[in-house]
Amino acid sequence: MFKKTRRKLTLMYSISFLIFFLIFMTILYFSIVKLMDYQQIEELEIYYTEQYHDFFEHMYDRDRKVEFNENRMYFYYIYTKEHILVHGDENYKGLSKKVESIYQNEDGAKSSVKRLHWQDEHFLLLSKPIQNDGEFLGYIILGKSTTSQYHFFQKMILLFVVLVIFFTLLIGLLSYYMAGKAMVPIHNSLEKQKKFVSDASHELRTPLSIFYSSLDILESDESKNLSDFSKELIKDLKDETQLMKELLEKLLFLARHDQNQLEEKRESFSLTDLLLNISEKFHRTLPKEISLKKDIQKDVVFVGDPKKIVELIYIFLENAVLYTQAGSISIKLLQTNDKIKILIEDTGIGISDEEVPLIFDRFFRSSSVRKRDGTGLGLSIAQAIVKEHGGWIEVKSEVGKGTTFCTTFPFPK
C-alpha cells in the first residue's frame, strides 16, 4: 500500500513539475522570440528613418538597378506605387525577385512586417510607404538576415528539451525520496495500530471465552432458579458474546494479513464441486422470496486454500442476501485459458456510485443496510483472501437493479 502511494505521489509531483516547467519554458521562449523580433524591427525602423531622404531621392533615379554588396547588414528595395522596382541594395543575389513576388499584390501604402525563408536563409522584411506632402509615391522594403537567430532558437529548443528531461528525472528522484521520508511516520503509526489490533484481538479472546463459558455454566446450573427474564438476558449475553468473538476473529485475520503472517495453504481441489456443495447448502437457508441460480462450469480445478475460498463465497452470498429482499441470486463459474472467474449476482437494491469505492473499507456499512446485523468487515476479508490468491475483485452495481461481484484469479495456460 505504501509503495503504491509513494509511486503515486512521485508521479503526481513529477507531472506537476513537468507541467509547470513546460509552461515556464514556453513563456520564456516566446518572450525571447518576441523581444528579439521587436529589437530587429526597431533596428529596421531606425535605418529607415536615417536613410529616408536617400530613399526619397532614389525615387527619381533614371538608372534603375539593384546594387550587390555581400558585406551589407541591411538590404532594401524601392518600388513605385505601381510596384515597379526603382532602386535596391542587396547582399543576397536574386533575392529581389523573390521579394517582388511576395509584395506584388500588397498595398504599399500600409506598413507591414513579414518573414521570408529562401535558399536555406531566413529574413525579416519591413515594408514602409514613401510620401511627399501627404502624397503616396511608392514604398520601400527593408530587410536583414535572421538566419543566425533562427539557428539560435533551434538550439535553444533542443536545450530546453534536454533541461526538461534532466530536471524531470531529478525532481522524480527527489520526489520519490521525499515521499518516502514523509510516509515514514505514517507507516510507523499504522504498524503500531496493526500491532495493537492484533495484540488486543489475541488478548481478548481468552477472557471472552471464559465469559461465554461462565454464562453457559450459569444457564445450566441455575436454570431452575432463573426467571424467564434472567434466562432471556443470559441468552442475549451469549449471542452478543458470540458476535464479539466473531468480530475478534475477523480483526485477527485482517491484522495477520496486514503483517503478512497468514498461513499459506495451497492444494489442488475441484472448484466446481466446492461451488456446487456451497450452492446446495446455501439454498436451504434462503427465504422463499429469493431464488438461487447456478451456472457452474464443469471440471474446473483450482490451487489454493479451500477453506478460505469457502469463506470468500459465503461472504459474497450473505452480502447478496442483505441487499436482496426479493428476487434472485446467481452463482457463475467459468474458466478461460488464463483466468478463472467467479461471479455472484443479485437483483437487489444495488449500491450507489458514491458507495461502490468504499465497500471494501473496514467497518463501512452502506446506508441501506446500516440497521442490519454485521461487523462491516466481510468484504475487507474477502478482498484480503482474493489478494492472497493473486486475484482481484470487480464490482458492477446499479441502484434498483442489482449488484455483481466478479472475482478473477489468474490461471496459467
Image (cartoon, grey):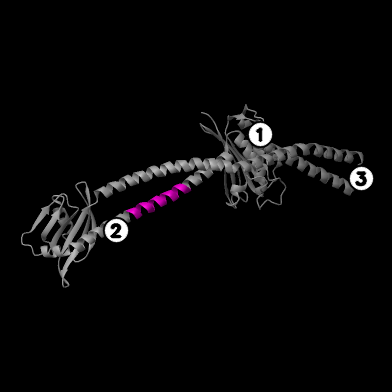
- The amino acid beneath tag 1 is Lys
Residue 407 visible in the displayed image: no
* Residue 290 rendering spot, x and y as whole percentages: 66, 46
Q: Residue furthest bottom?
A: 133
Q: Nearer the viewer, residue 28 or 323?
A: 28
* Residue sitting at x 49%, y 40%: 173
Q: Earlier in the sequence, mark 1 or mark 3?
A: 3
Q: Residues within 10 Å of mark 1 (few under 14, many from 20)?
A: some
Instruction: Calculate the distance from the C-alpha at mark 2 to the C-alpha at mark 1.
Output: 75 Å
Quadrant of image for the N terminus = top right
106 lies above or below 156: below
Callout 3 secondary element = loop
Q: Earlier in the sequence, mark 3 or mark 2?
A: 2
Pointer 3 residue: 226
Per the image, the residue denoted by label 1 is 308
Name the image quarter holding residue 408.
top right
Looking at the picture, tell me which residue is in the foreground, 274 or 182: 182
Element at label 1: helix
- Quickly name the residue at label 2: 38
Looking at the rendering, the stretch of residues picked out in magenta corresponds to: 16-32
Secondary element under disc 2, as helix, strand or loop, is: helix
Rendered position, 139 above or below 251: below
Q: Disc 2, disc 1: CB below 8 Å? A: no
Q: CA distance from mark 3 to mark 2?
A: 103 Å
